[in-house]
Amino acid sequence: DTKKGRWEPVKEGVRGTKYTVPKLQEGHDYQFRVVASGPNGDSEALETDKPTTARKPYDEPFPPSQPQCKERDRDHITITWQPPEKDGGAPVEGYNVERKEPKSNRWTKIDKDLVPGCEFTDSKVTDGKEYQYRVTATNEAGESEPSLPSSAIVAKPSKEAPKVNLDALFGAKEIRVKAGEPLTIPIGISGAPTPTCSWEKSGRPVDKRADCTNTEDEAKLHIPKSERGDTGKYTITVTNESGTQSADIPVVVLDKPGAPGGPLEVSDVMAESCKLSWKEPEDNGGAEVTGYVVEKCEEGSDFWDKVPGVVMGTSHPVKGLKEGKKYKFRVKAENIYGAGEPLVTDKPTLAKNPFDTPDAPRDVTIPKYDKNSAEIHWKEPNSDGGNPIKGYIVEKKPKSGEWVPCNNFPVKDTNFTVMGLKEGQVLEFRVKAVNDGGEGKPSKATEPHKVRDQVFPAGAPNQPNVDKITKDSVGLSWQKPANDGGGKLKGYIIEKKKKDGDWEEAKEVPATENSCTIPNLKEGDEYQFRVKAVNAAGPGEPSRPTKAVVVEEQPAKPVLNMSGVKDVTVKAGQNFQISIPYTGFPKPTATWINGDEEIKDSPRVALKVLDDQIVLANSKAERGDSGKYKVTLKNDSGQESGTLNVNVLDKPAAPEGPLTATDIVGEELTLNWKAPKDDGGEKINNYIVEKRKAGSKQWQKVSSFINSPSCNVRNLEPGTEYEFRVMAENMQGVSEPLETSTPILAKLPYDTPGAPGKPECIEFTEDSATITWDTPRKDGGNPIKGYVVEKKKK
């Protein structure tokens, strides 16, 4: 065995030159050798030239041919095949048959024993089911490869009359589709051999758009995009050699309806309206007509405008036409699937009345009104246009707005109250007459009307009082009228009249004022004056005029006008001026007093008395100019005084002395002083304290942040005399200093003790001595802490 790679003994003592080697393994390669054996020993080995494969002397047969269906029915299938082209060198002993369903990959053997011939009947089939078969041949060498599978074979009769099955319609009596959607008619069929199919629609061949296909068990008609014309009865006919059968399938393609029935008639033509009539469409599109769309198109335009309103019947009024224009009309029927093709008029129609519209109403007025309404009155037009007037339309227009009707339906009377107005709104009104020809020309609009409660001219104020007369003016006053006319007063008009002249307007004043001065009058002329109150209705009745007055100055005591005069506050060195208006004739004299002293003209102070004011002008103000100023004006008719305060801000005066020292304790002491008599017109906000040693010229700052008139001074040299000074400070600067009158000694509050008594020696040795003494008579004001003993050589 070449696989084992070693020699193995097979048989010894073989007689002759031929031997059959047993027990070989099929498929293995073998080499053989023979050794001759005799009395004198063994010969050299004789080996085969090449290996020999152990196998049978014949092969398995070739596969049989592809099985064919010989005969079939609902309970069996008989197949036949041809023997293999080669039997492999050994006779074919028989055949094995296998089958499977077309969608399966699992083959199952269906014969119990080898089939001796080339035909087999499968009796274990299911009605209507498909099967495939294959066959293998067997000889002494074994089983061949399987044949090619047969085609799918259905367990059904080979010959059967054709039938049509409408189960795919699920019991529907007809097929309904919407236009534009695909139309598909699936029909089940049967019959053997497979029947041919033909389709008809309403007795005629189907449209070329229809795609008709069929298989063994189904026929199908398909139209990708259905149309309304595809509606009808579809007939399918199936035929084979065993017979023929047909079935009808009603189809309804739902679509928009067809055009309405003509002609489209136009009647009752007026300037702004007409009436259209038509017939129902012959084809409703497979659904009930739900209404109609009516449109109009002005001649010369391609734009079709829909006529408002719901159109249910086969006639409809058309409104909103323009007089003198020609129109075409069209109507479309409508169902749930949309509007169909239109029915159009044959020729244009001219919008014209058989008579004219009325003329414009006349003399529109607003005799009554309030803040919510206005009552409009007018007169009938001169001509009704040849047709009786049915009523009137009242229109209103706000400022910069459009005209809008005030009444929904024409009113028969020649008056109408417009309600629901907004107070304060400014409106105009106009009126149109209406007859069968429509609205006539509008009347002339009213003047702009402000919506408010009705106001009448106010009554007359009382006779004006003459309060003041000057050389070119007259002052008047009056009381408001008892009757304001029902409206808020807006103001007053004051009129004047020269002697033998006419009344003319002199001045207007607001309603809040009941007095005024009439200026620019000519001195020496004689005048009368009267007053009119003004409200929303305009100027009212004039008051009784004043008596004639001559325009000339009248003697009057001086009167100061202190209402605009304020106290004066300035910084030292600045200028200030006091101006006080006054009235009085003749011109008065003025006396100014500051405190108890009279102020007179000086290089720094100028005093003036002008025609209408007095002036005090001060240049480079000083602190001494501060005080309460009093001015007195005086003329032959009397006198009057007025006061104001003047405050000239400056640095303060020096602090008040004396500058004294207390609590002197060696290195520190306390300085005391008084606040300045004059704070410069502003609060003292600080004191500055300085020191220097007696005899020195150099001052040293002790502190510059002191709020009260005392200061604790530290870091002094005991036994040294010092001088001190203090300055006050406000927002305007630092005052002159207050200095100590004599130097102040920095010392302790006690002295050194007096001398002790004379020492006496009471005991001594070679190197020591004991001495005694008496205490000093004075301890300096402080208890003695101890003694210092000194010695010297004699």
Image: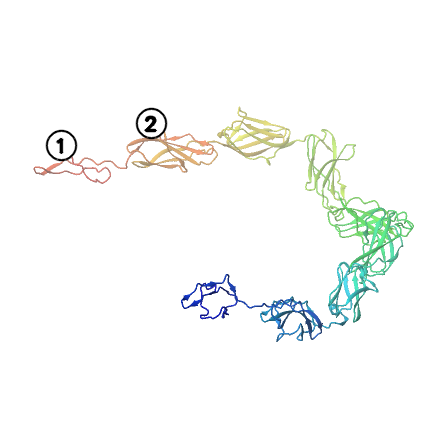
Q: Secondary structure at mark 1?
A: loop
Residue 227 x, y percent position in the rendering: 79, 59
Which sits in the foreground, 620 or 324? 324
What residue type is disc 1 on? Lys
Q: Quadrant of residue 459?
A: top right
Residue position for label 1? 792
* Placement of 61 over or under 437, stated as above or below: below
Residue 129: image quadrant is: bottom right
Residue furthest left as drawn: 766
- The crowding category of the residue bearing disc 1, from other C-alpha atoms within 10 Å (few below 14, some 14 to 19, many at least 20), is few
* Left or right, residue 442 beside residue 543: right
Amino acid found under the numbered disc labelled 2: Ser
- Image point 78% across, 32% down: which residue? 501
Query: Of circles 1 and 2, which is in front?
Result: 1
Look at mark 2 in the image and give the residue it sits on.
Answer: 696
Is residue 148 depicted above or below 761 in this figure?
below
Q: CA distance from mark 1 to mark 2?
A: 42 Å
**In terms of secondary structure, where does tag 2 sit?**
loop
- Does 609 sit left or right of 682 as displayed? right
Tell me: 199 left or right of 763: right
Instruction: Give the label on residue 127, or none.
Output: none
The residue at 40%/38% (across/down) is 708
Q: Quadrant of the C terminus?
A: top left
Q: Position of residue 689 (x, y in %)?
A: 38, 33
Place of residue 432 in the rendered image (x, y in percent of width and height, measured from the top left): 84, 49
| Residue 290 visible in this rendered orientation of the protein | no
Decide if residue 696 is on the left or right side of residue 792: right
Q: Is residue 615 visible?
A: yes
